[in-house]
Image (tube, rainbow, N blue to C red):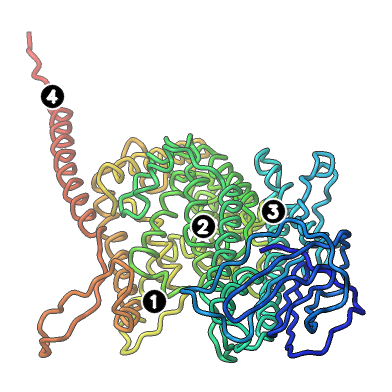
């Protein structure tokens, strides 16, 4: 029922049996009158009669209707025969419905009168023009407070501008994040204000005494004049209503969807062929050659980006996606600088993927902090950055500038580290720009330790130290030494991969060795081992490399991982890693178990070594036959 009832503020309330309760809320006025007399609203003809049997009502609108915002409507109880000459009655509106089931209403009935307001129609927010959007300044330093009405307008305008710029692809990730953060804070402030307002509405409604209206009417009041259902009695310890919780969850999901949409838009886009190849990223014998082909010769760019994003490093350390892309592009260029057959971007991507396997598939990532994982992945990517395609010994023997710079000590490894951190001093490539000073120092120390550990001259000492540590009753493994050994083992792991991959790596490495041998010959230097293309035994060299270098390294690495991860696995049986407990041989305790990790490299090493031995036997037979032919002298006939 929508009828207007307006009364001046000085309207007189006649004496009689009445009890009035007035409810005002902006554009609504409720007049509740308990009376058995006639009700005479101000400005109308008093011809509505309330009886115990039902309603008989007729109402004449005043000839002149005024809007008075400041004066609340009131109900006036007048004795029979109230003053005022009656006017001609217009057609009466239909009477209100009779009480349900024909029962008379209780003493104390309810009349609801609503008045219009100048703000009855919601003001529509005008869509900003292109001129407004073009002139918009996205600076976030001089914005209004988030709890002000102006902030809502600013946030809405900025969101529209961001959507337009996203469609054009002309917005930086940093500007996007700052403005989305401001908009999210505005939404949170609006939600808090709205929650308080709803609570105020409920409080106002609670002023209507429970015995003044029936429960059905109170429910109707709550659903019509407020935005949440009111109960007859409020409890101080009442839990949040489901509707309020649902609104909060819905608002949170909305903001999260905006953030995810913007983040996914800002991230680098991958070609479909690259996405297909990266589906096997978690496998031990990942085909990095297929990634190289699918990526158009940029495996480091896509694999490095995928790993840092998969481990959450981009989000956790606030790495701008554009900065990361620039960094990886420059790293890729550095690996291709000398056109090396082996130490190139393919090798960097292969080592980074192998490190990922060690972190993820063994569960080692659960032992490391986020910063340590970040440093490990970056170290794997840059560990051979700007490699010259020659060994440290070649630099020392030839007296290169790099050897002079680093005093013949870990010449290439020092250069890889120095060049990578020098690159990150460029603002466009500084993926560490949001690290704290302490985080940067820890990150840098870890990367230096890991890359220096890839120097093969430290190989045997490194294995010896780790073996000695693991023989202790209660070994404590230093994290820096652990990840350093991991990177070193991954650097020399190609003989532990599938045969087709390993054989291809071997041929590339031998090509690089032979090119160095050619340089040594030109400089008058003695040939380095395996660098003479005319006298190198390929199969025998690979058998020796597997038996004396790779197999012992992978064995120590596996022992170290089991030592580290055993306690973690026993404390958390619901570990998500792929490691599994295997029953140990009986040692007097039938229930004793020892934590073991999966070792897919063991099978590959065994298979590859077997193939090389077969090849070595064939090569030996061919050499013997050739030597026999060379030693045989054809018979001469004397005349």
Residue farthest to the top, as pictured = 639
Q: Mark 2 or mark 3, which has the lower sequence index? A: 3
Choose between 307 and 95: the one closer to the eye.
Answer: 95
2 or 3: mark nearer the eye: 3
Q: Tag 3, which secondary structure?
A: helix
Residue at image coords 86%, 62%: 142
Residue position marked by numbered label 2 in the rendering: 308
Q: Residue at x 80, y 41 (%)?
A: 129
Quarter of the picture containing the N terminus is bottom right
Q: Nearer the viewer, mark 4 or mark 1?
A: 1
Q: Earlier in the sequence, mark 3 or mark 1?
A: 3
Dot 3 corresponds to which residue?
A: 176
Q: Position of residue 343 (x, y in %)?
A: 46, 46
Give the percent coordinates (x, y) of residue 622: 16, 34
Graded by Cα atoms within 10 Å as few (under 14), some (14 to 19) or many (20 or more), the crowding at tag 2 reads some
- The mark found on residue 633 in the picture is 4
Q: CA distance from mark 1 to mark 2?
A: 31 Å
- Label 4 to label 2: alpha-carbon separation: 66 Å
For the residues labelled 3 and 4, the Cα–Cα distance comes to: 83 Å
Mark 3, other Cα within 10 Å: few <14 / some 14–19 / many ≥20: many
As measured in the structure, the alpha-carbon distance from the residue carrying label 2 to the one carrying label 3 is 21 Å
Residue 261 locus on image (x, y percent): 57, 51
Q: Earlier in the sequence, mark 4 or mark 1?
A: 1
């Amino acid at each position: 029922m929508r009828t207007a009832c307006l009364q001046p503020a000085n309207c007189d309330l006649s004496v009689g049996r009445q009890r009035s309760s007035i409810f005002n809320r902006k554009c609504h006025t409720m007049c509740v009158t308990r009376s058995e007399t006639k009700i005479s609203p101000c400005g109308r003809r008093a011809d509505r009669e309330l009886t115990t049997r039902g309603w008989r009502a007729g109402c004449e609108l005043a000839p002149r209707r005024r809007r008075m915002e400041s004066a609340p409507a009131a109900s006036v109880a007048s004795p029979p025969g109230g003053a005022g000459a009656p006017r001609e009655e217009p057609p009466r509106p239909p009477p209100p419905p009779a009480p349900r089931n024909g029962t008379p209403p209780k003493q104390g009935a309810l009349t609801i009168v609503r008045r219009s307001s100048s703000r009855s129609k919601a003001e529509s927010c005008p869509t900003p023009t292109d001129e407004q959007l073009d002139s918009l300044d996205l600076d976030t330093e001089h914005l209004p407070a988030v709890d002000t009405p102006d902030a809502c307008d600013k946030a809405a305008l900025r969101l529209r501008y961001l959507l337009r710029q996203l469609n054009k692809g002309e917005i930086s990730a940093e500007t996007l994040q700052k403005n989305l953060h401001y908009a999210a804070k505005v939404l949170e402030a609006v939600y808090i204000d709205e929650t308080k307002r709803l609570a105020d509405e409920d409080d106002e409604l609670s002023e209507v005494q429970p015995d003044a209206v029936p429960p059905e009417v109170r429910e109707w009041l709550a659903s019509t004049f407020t935005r949440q259902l009111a109960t007859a009695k409020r409890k101080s310890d009442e839990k949040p209503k489901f509707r309020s919780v649902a609104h909060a969850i819905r608002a949170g999901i909305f903001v999260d969807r905006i953030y995810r949409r913007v983040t996914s838009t800002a991230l680098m886009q991958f070609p479909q062929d690259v996405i297909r190849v990266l589906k096997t990223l978690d496998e031990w014998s990942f085909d990095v050659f297929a990634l190289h082909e699918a990526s158009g010769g940029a495996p480091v760019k896509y694999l490095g980006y995928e790993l840092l994003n998969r481990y959450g490093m981009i989000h956790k350390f606030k790495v701008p996606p554009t900065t990361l892309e620039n960094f990886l592009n420059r790293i890729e260029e550095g690996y291709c600088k000398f056109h090396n057959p082996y130490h190139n971007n393919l090798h960097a991507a292969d080592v980074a993927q192998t490190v990922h396997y060690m972190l993820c598939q063994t569960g080692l990532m659960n032992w490391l902090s986020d910063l340590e994982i970040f440093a490990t992945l970056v170290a794997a990517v840059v560990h051979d950055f700007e490699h010259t395609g020659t060994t440290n010994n070649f630099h020392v023997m030839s007296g290169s500038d790099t050897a002079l710079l680093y005093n013949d000590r870990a010449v290439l490894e020092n250069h890889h580290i120095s060049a990578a951190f020098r690159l990150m001093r460029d603002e466009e490539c500084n993926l560490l720009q949001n690290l704290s000073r302490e985080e940067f120092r820890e990150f840098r120390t870890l990367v230096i330790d890991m890359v220096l550990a890839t120097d093969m001259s430290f190989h045997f000492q490194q294995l010896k130290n780790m073996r000695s540590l693991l023989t202790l009753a209660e070994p404590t493994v230093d994290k820096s030494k652990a990840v350093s050994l991991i990177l070193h083992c991954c650097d020399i792991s190609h003989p532990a991969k599938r045969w087709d991959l390993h054989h291809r790596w071997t041929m590339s490495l031998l090509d690089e060795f032979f090119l160095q041998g050619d340089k040594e010959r030109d400089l008058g230097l003695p040939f380095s081992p395996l660098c003479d293309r005319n006298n190198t035994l390929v199969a025998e060299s690979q058998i020796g490399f597997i038996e004396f270098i790779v197999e012992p390294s992978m064995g120590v690495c596996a022992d170290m991982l089991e030592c580290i991860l055993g306690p973690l696995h026993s404390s958390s049986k619901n570990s998500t890693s792929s490691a599994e407990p295997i029953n140990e041989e009986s040692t007097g305790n039938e229930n004793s178990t020892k934590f073991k990790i999966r070792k897919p490299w063991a099978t590959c090493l065994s298979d590859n070594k077997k193939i090389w031995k077969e090849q070595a036997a064939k090569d030996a037979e061919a050499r013997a036959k050739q030597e026999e032919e060379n030693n045989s002298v054809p018979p001469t006939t004397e005349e």
